[in-house]
Amino acid sequence: MATTNASAPKRSLALPESARALDKLNRQFSVGGINSLPVYFGSGQGSRLIDSDGRELIDFISGFSASNLGQRHPRILEAQLNTANRITIANIAGQAEGWPVLAKTLCEKFGYDKVVAMTTGSEATDTACKLARGWGVSVKKINPRDVLVLGTSENYHGTISGVWPLMEPEAGWEEFATFSKNMTNINPKTGKVLRYLHPEDYAEVFEQMHERIAAVIMEPLHGLARSMEEEINFCIEVRKLCKKYNILFIADEVRMGSCKTGRFLSSDWMGPENKPDMVTLGKSISGGAFPASFVLGPDEVMTKMKPYHSVSTFSMSSMAVAAVQAALKVYEEDNLQQRARDIHAKWAAETSTWNFPYLRYAPGFGADLNLLLDEEYQNRPENISPRRLSLLCVSKGLLVFPGANGRVRLGVALTISDEDLFQGFKILKEALDELPLYGDIEGSEETLGAF
């Protein structure tokens, strides 16, 4: 491990020419996003990306699990091209001929009665919550003004206004007036956030006001605990409480579904006896090749959806249908659930040998991986931060992403070769070793985000 010398000059790291120019334009004319790194891509294949300066990077973030099958998977690409050569869009005045068949496939594969299609993951979670509130009103007989859908801390369901109140007030309740009396991850009685990994918080709020609560929605696995078992056990406890009080349990599988954790759905780890009442799918359900998302649930909930209650121009599109059908075959035929478990084992073996004082731990849930850095080092001479580490990794040929609270987000495609996987591990270790030697790293300025 590298050691720092207080009197030795620090290294510096500058942005390449094209990245600097594009970043300047981006800052001048664009808003939104997620504090992306100043890296701009023009092409990619599998787990390799080429940026605007011609650098080749190994992809260790996979579009936040949108590209679990890598870039331009040949079987998905073939299905898309064949479809694009036949039709551009099957408008909502009619439907794509493949949609009824795909709807049947999804319901039978995941064991639900009905499915509704949307376009983005945010739309899917928003629609699931709307359906749950409708069930609460019509079946559980909750007053429409009182019906509640609860979330949990540290969750993410998108940034559209409908689901924004499920995240803490710091996400921007005040700035954008996204208050809601029906959607929250705060106990209305106590004002305390319902904490992930704390089933006692749900036992308390359910006991206090179960007659008002229609549903709980959460990403079953967040990937940040030291072990999967800790997160799985929490979800099971909440699921059991939901059954006790007749409350729907909605699993948001947009990010951690599609074989990412070693089973097709992350909620599958809870066991069939704890099957969620509803699930949402998105991102890599189409291999990330075309936007497609879905909500699945039982007739008792889903048949509350009438015409015009859920409409999206590009949902059920021919291209989406083709991409999803192809992706489902790839996941099954290539046994990618097992591949995720193999990646997990390789990550655990690799990181077990790492010894950095500023690395707290390195959890791995299938192919979803993370580094948790000790934030106390950020203002010390070592100058350790997720963004600085991420930019150093990029300079060495590896794409990772800086999260909040010392988190470096990682996640590899299930199709990644062992060669690229181990090369990525090598770069990560080198970057952790060398980061204390660096002073100025261009583009590492921290920008306060919502989460």
Image: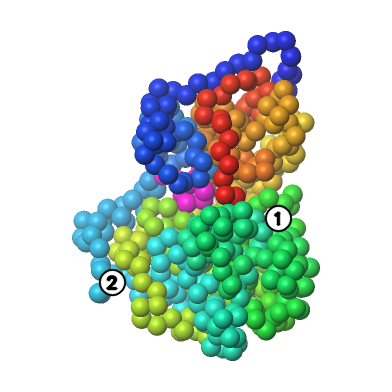
Please give the residue where the numbered disc 2 appears in the rendered image: 92
- Report the magenta residues as a range: 62-71
**Residue ranking furthest to the left:** 86
Q: Is residue 104 left or right of residue 432?
A: left
Tell me where residue 327 sits by quadrant: bottom left
Residue 226: tell me if it is visible: yes
Q: Position of residue 127 (x, y in %)?
A: 47, 71
Who is closer to the viewer here, 4 or 265?
A: 4
Which class describes the residues within 10 Å of circle 2: few (<14), some (14-19), or many (20+)?
some
Q: Main secondary structure of the magenta part?
A: loop
Indicate whether 121 appears above or below 340. Answer: below
Three-letter code, disc 1: Met
Q: Position of residue 411 (x, y in %)?
A: 56, 45
Secondary structure at numbered mark 1: helix
Residue 410: tell me if it is visible: no
Say which quadrant the N terminus sits in. Answer: top right
First in sequence, mark 2 or 1: give its number.
2
Three-letter code, disc 2: Ile
Please give the residue where the numbered disc 1 appears in the rendered image: 228
Residue visible at 65% across and 11% down in the picture: 9
Separation of disc 2 and disc 1 at Cα?
41 Å
Tell me where residue 378 sits by quadrant: top right
Labels in figure, total: 2
Residue visible at 52% across and 61% down in the picture: 177
Who is closer to the viewer here, 165 or 37?
A: 165
Q: Position of residue 141 (x, y in %)?
A: 59, 89
